[in-house]
Every structure is written in structure tokens, then in C-alpha cells.
Amino acid sequence: MVRSIPIEIQPVAKSRVSEYDLTHVPFGKCFSDHMLVAEYVNGAWQKAQILPYQDQPLSYAISALHYGQAIFEGMKAYKNASGQVSLFRPLENLKRLNTGAVRMAMPEVPEDLFMEGLCELIRLDQQWVPDSEFGSLYIRPFLIATDEAIGVKISDTYKFIILTCPAGKYYADPIKVWIETSYFRAVHGGVGFVKAAGNYGRSLYPTKLAEARGYKQVLWTDSETHSYFEESGTMNVMFVIDGKLITPALSDTILDGITRKSVLQLARHWNMPVEERKVSIQEVLEAISKGTLTEVFGCGTAATIAQIIGIGYKTDYYELKPVAERTFSTKVDETLRKIRKGLMPDPFDWMLPV
């Protein structure tokens, strides 16, 4: 392969892959042999390196730790029956990463650095991609500010790093969610549309409270009125009401999910009515009482399709229709998995072989 950017590769002497059962690894705790690292110094991106997975020397005074200049992406690689490894819609992740970089006053990552570095890394560690039915290689690109300075200012230096880890299902079972009306995830004019580290940090305490009530995740509502749904903790949320797929419209408080985008594209391809608009708590509760709400699910890179089987709100709990009766989300889940695994045609050219 002819590269447009220099990439220095330092391969490991011996792979660690044989030490693991790739079909049974905890999510995000088992890392592959190599990592990609590139530095931004003096207003320019420097030579990229693919190194053995290792700790990186960082000062305790770096801007990312103190002032939150830290963004990331989540994406996956899949292996088909013939052993070919492909990425799912990687340019969408790059686009979203750079949208976040602009908002966080960070340098955008060039396409050649992102794509060539990523593909080289995945080729080198392709034996880490599980070939099981629900297995994938989770990919975590992230960008952090590295100026060693205690003072609120835009950093002059940055590191772009890509880590990978084999993964199975994020949610092994259907989940129950809590409608959150005391805390909020994002505000207009903020960074809710960015995969910024701080967005997830602020969500941990409300999620802890929901878990204490017996729920796996929260359903965030708007910060102004707490009347309209926005997204769930690790995913966008979707409802099937009266045969229509309904999901909150994107705004600067909602993440533009790649899986969300893909589900909507599939629905329209199948001629299912789709509505992207405000979705109120009242509308959903009324649909539950009338029996017109047939499916609720979350969608995201890690979660893929996560079935929501119960909703808690104030003092009430609402049991939803069983997963066995959910035709649309089940079909979406199966279709996405088969396209990613090369078991059916890819009519949208979503998969990029590496």
C-alpha cells in the first residue's frame, strides 16, 4: 500500500492474542498488541507511530486533565467468514471527531492520518478481531490536549491515539431505563453533540442513582422542561408507535450517532414511516397505555441494538412489550449484523475492507 503520510511501525516481538479467549473478554479491558500515536506540535501533525500497546508518559499538569480538552470516538471492525476484516462507516466517525475538535478548539485530524493509520493498525492486529457471531474489534480513537501548564488556555500541543480491544455484546440482556428529570446531560450552546469526555463524567452520578433503583441506564430529558426525551446514557433512543419509527431530532444537545443514522436509513429503505422530532414523556406514556407503543430500543456503536423492556418514571414502572414481539428492531439488529459480517449484501457501501 502506498501511504500519503509517514507511519513508523514498531511491531511486537510476540503477540499476546493466544493468552485470551476472544469470545469471552470483558468489554474495554483487554487491549490488542498495538496502538497508534501521533502528536500535534508547532501547528502541525507529526509522523504517526504504531507502537506496542503501552503506557504513555504524560504530565499531571496537562490541559486535558484540568480543563477537559478531550474527545473520543467509538467504532468497530468485523471479520467475515472468509477472514476479511472491514470497518463500519469509518469516515462518519472521522467527520464527527472533527466536528467535536472544532467545538473544543482542538486541531482537526487529517483524513489521511486517521484512515491510513487506522487501516495499518487494524491490518497489523487483525488476529484480534473475533470471528464469533456477535464479536467485533472495538476501536477507540481519541484526542487530548497535552500542554504542561496550569492555566486556562487553548493547548498548543495534542496527542491523537487509537486503541483497540476485542468485544462481544455490550448489553447481554434487554435493559430497564430510568427517565431522568432532576439532572441533565446537555444544554443548548454546550457540547452535547460532541463525544467529549466531560459529557460522560457528568452522567455517572445520575446513572449510579438509577442503578440503585434497579435500572441499567437513564433516559435523558431536555434541560429546560424535562418533558422531552433526548438520548440514553450510551446510545440514541428510538420508539415504534403506531407503526412509525420515531426518534428525537438532532440538535446541539444530542449526539449524531452513526448507528442511529444507519437504523434510520434502513427504515426508509424498507419504506417504514420515520419521524425525527421532539418526543415527549407524555406522548410515550399515553402510547404505552393505549398499546400503540410496540418497541423501544437504544442504538449505538457499543450497544448496537439494545432492547429496552421497562421504563421507570417518578413512582411508576412501565413494563413494555416482550422482545419476541418486536419485529422492526429485531430485523434491524439481524440486518446490521449480517451486513457487518458479510452474510448479506451491503447496499449502502457501509463496509470498508482493510
Image (cartoon, rainbow, N blue to C red):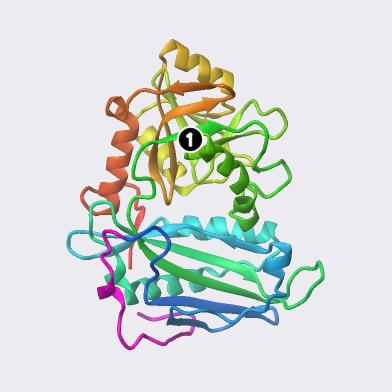
Query: Is residue 274 visible in the rendered structure shown here?
Result: no
When the figure is inspected, residue 42 is found, relative to residue 304, above or below; the finding is below
Residue drawn at (47%, 57%) of the image: 74
Residue drawn at (54%, 46%) of the image: 256
Q: Main secondary structure of the magenta part?
A: loop
Does the magenta portion include 122?
Answer: no
* Rendered-image quadrant of the C terminus: bottom left
Q: Position of residue 260 (x, y in %)?
A: 46, 42
Query: From which residue to which does the magenta span run?
Result: 1-24
User: Where is mark 1, residue-wise?
Assistant: 214
> In this image, 209 relative to 288: left or right?
right
Residue drawn at (41%, 47%) of the image: 303
Q: Position of residue 207 (x, y in %)?
A: 56, 42
Does the magenta portion include 7?
Answer: yes
Query: Is residue 235 visible in the rendered structure shown here?
Result: yes
Q: Position of residue 285 (x, y in %)?
A: 52, 18
Q: Position of residue 279 (x, y in %)?
A: 56, 26
